[in-house]
């Protein structure tokens, strides 16, 4: 099982590697078996979405509180579905 810091690093990598798009909102979701940051219209409804963020917010960066919240959500998912 991954710890919260490892999961936050995976999320940071997904955000950094998000596809170029004209989208204004992105979803941090499980996509094709891995964590991805995709334009909101690209994620399928049955995929778990952990956070929806505006492009401007992603460029500026998440706050410590948002990173902690996201890390906990990812940890709960990994504990329940990835063990």
Image: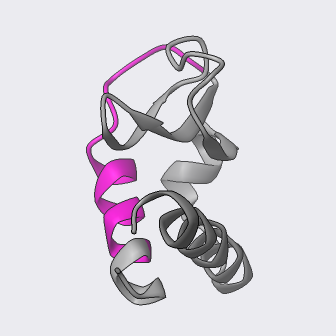
The residue at the point 34 percent across, 50 percent down is: 14
**Is 30 positioned to the left or the right of 58 in the image?**
left
13 or 33: nearer the eye? 33
Residue 16 position, x and y percent, is 31, 52
Q: Quadrant of the C terminus?
A: bottom left
80 or 11: nearer the eye? 80
The span picked out in magenta is: 8-23
In the displayed structure, would residue 24 be above or below residue 83?
Answer: above
Question: Was residue 19 drawn as part of the magenta stretch in this picture?
Answer: yes
The residue at the point 35 percent across, 80 percent down is: 1
The residue at the point 56 percent across, 16 percent down is: 44
Which of the 4 image quarters holds residue 64?
A: bottom right
19 or 22: nearer the eye? 19
41 or 72: nearer the eye? 72
Which of the 4 image quarters holds residue 65?
A: bottom right
In the displayed structure, would residue 59 be above or below residue 79?
Answer: above
Question: Was residue 3 drawn as part of the magenta stretch in this picture?
Answer: no
């Amino acid at each position: 099982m991954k710890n919260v810091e490892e999961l936050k690093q995976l999320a940071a990598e997904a955000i950094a590697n998000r596809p170029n798009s004209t989208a204004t909102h992105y979803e941090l979701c499980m996509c094709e078996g891995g964590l991805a940051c995709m334009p909101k219209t690209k994620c399928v409804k049955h995929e778990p979405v952990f956070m929806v963020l505006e492009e401007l917010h992603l460029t500026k960066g998440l706050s410590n509180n948002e990173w902690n919240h996201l890390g906990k959500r990812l940890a709960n998912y990994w504990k329940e579905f990835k063990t």
